[in-house]
Structures are given as structure tokens and as C-alpha cells.
């Protein structure tokens, strides 16, 4: 079973001073050390993905019908060797539930961007209320935790207004 986790530390940076210019988002998947070797955590992530590919290959082995894929979708993909699987995973892995980039935490946590009322530390009149507030990813299906965060933030905002 594949499990959602966040061992890596991504970054969101501004490309320019133009507020309409989208930010640069780097998830830092499969981080490497200074020598170019995968970090131990990145190696664990890659191993989990290898196992996931193996499970899917096993499930599809006895299937009589062919998956309707675009002809170029798997062009030049080698899923029969570990090197090919590693390349496939590292080139195509993508987490579509970005989270944990502006986490809530105590004042003593150097990675905590927000206080418990969703206020950005050091910035006046700015709050963040989305999946980025989680200290750790709450799983694959984040919609319910996001609803909970939104309710909690609404309470915090209303309390400050009163």
C-alpha cells in the first residue's frame, strides 16, 4: 500500500515583483545530496514508488484488454528494469495535493509560518487558509481536513473581529 507523506521540503518563491506573475513551485521530489546521490529519505520514497509500479504491473499481467492510452503516453518507457522504473518515477511523479508549505506551529518552530489563528508571522493583516497550513500531509484525500481548517479559521477570524 502506498502512503502519502512529506519527507521532502519544497519551496515556493517569487519569480518577479509582478503580483500577476505566478510563483515558482519546486516540490524537491527525490532530493539529492551534494555528490548527486539520492538522500536516504528520497531513496525511501523511490523504493515505495518502485513497489507501487510492481503492484500495478502484477495486477495488469492477467488483464485481457488493453488500457486506452494516448500512443505517446508510454513512449520510450522501460518498466522492465529498475533503472527504467526509477527514471519513469522521477520524471513523472507529481503530487497534486500540495500542502505543508505554510505550516501552523509554535513560535519556537523555525518552519512554522503561521500562528494558531492562521496569521502569517511578521506580516500584518495576512492569513493563510488552505492545505499549506498542515504541519504534515493529512493523507491522499485532503478535502475534509481542508473543510475543518476553513471552519477553524472562520472561528479565529470572527473571534478577532469581536
Image (tube, grey):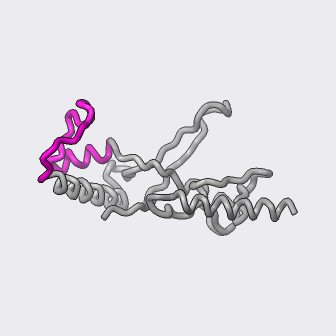
Quadrant of the image for the N terminus? bottom left
Residue 38 percent coordinates (x, y): 33, 54
- Is residue 83 inside the magenta stretch? yes
Q: Is residue 72 above or below residue 2?
A: above
Q: Is residue 51 magenta?
A: no
Q: Quadrant of residue 46?
A: bottom left
Q: Nearer the viewer, residue 47 or 109?
A: 47
Q: Residue at the front extreme?
A: 65
Could you tell me which residue is drawn at 40 percent across and 46 percent down?
94
How would you classify the magenta stretch by its main secondary structure?
loop
Give me the residue at 50% from left, 51% from top: 98
Where's residue 109, x and y in %? Answer: 62, 66
Image coordinates for residue 65, horizontal then vertical, percent = 16, 44
The stretch of residues the image draws in magenta is 62-91
| Quarter of the image that includes the C terminus | bottom right
Judge left or right: residue 18 versus residue 131: right
Image quadrant in which you'd find residue 54: bottom left
Is 6 on the left-hand or right-hand side of 69?
right
- The answer to whether 62 appears left or right of 120 in the picture is left
Amino acid at each position: 500500500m502506498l502512503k502519502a507523506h512529506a519527507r521532502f521540503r519544497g519551496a515556493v518563491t517569487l519569480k518577479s515583483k509582478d503580483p500577476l506573475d505566478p510563483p515558482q513551485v519546486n516540490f524537491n521530489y527525490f532530493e539529492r545530496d551534494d555528490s548527486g546521490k539520492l538522500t536516504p529519505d528520497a531513496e525511501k520514497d523511490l523504493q515505495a514508488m518502485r513497489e507501487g509500479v510492481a503492484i500495478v504491473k502484477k495486477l495488469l499481467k492477467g488483464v485481457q484488454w488493453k488500457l486506452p492510452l494516448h500512443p505517446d503516453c508510454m513512449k520510450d518507457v522501460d518498466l522492465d528494469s529498475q533503472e527504467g522504473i526509477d527514471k519513469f518515477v522521477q520524471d513523472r511523479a507529481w503530487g497534486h495535493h500540495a500542502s505543508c508549505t505554510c505550516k501552523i506551529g509554535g513560535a519556537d518552530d523555525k518552519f512554522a509560518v503561521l500562528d494558531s489563528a492562521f496569521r502569517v508571522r511578521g506580516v500584518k493583516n495576512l492569513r493563510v487558509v488552505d492545505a499549506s497550513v498542515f504541519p504534515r500531509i493529512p493523507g491522499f484525500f485532503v478535502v475534509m481536513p481542508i473543510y475543518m481548517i476553513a471552519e477553524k479559521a472562520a472561528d479565529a477570524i470572527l473571534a478577532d473581529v469581536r
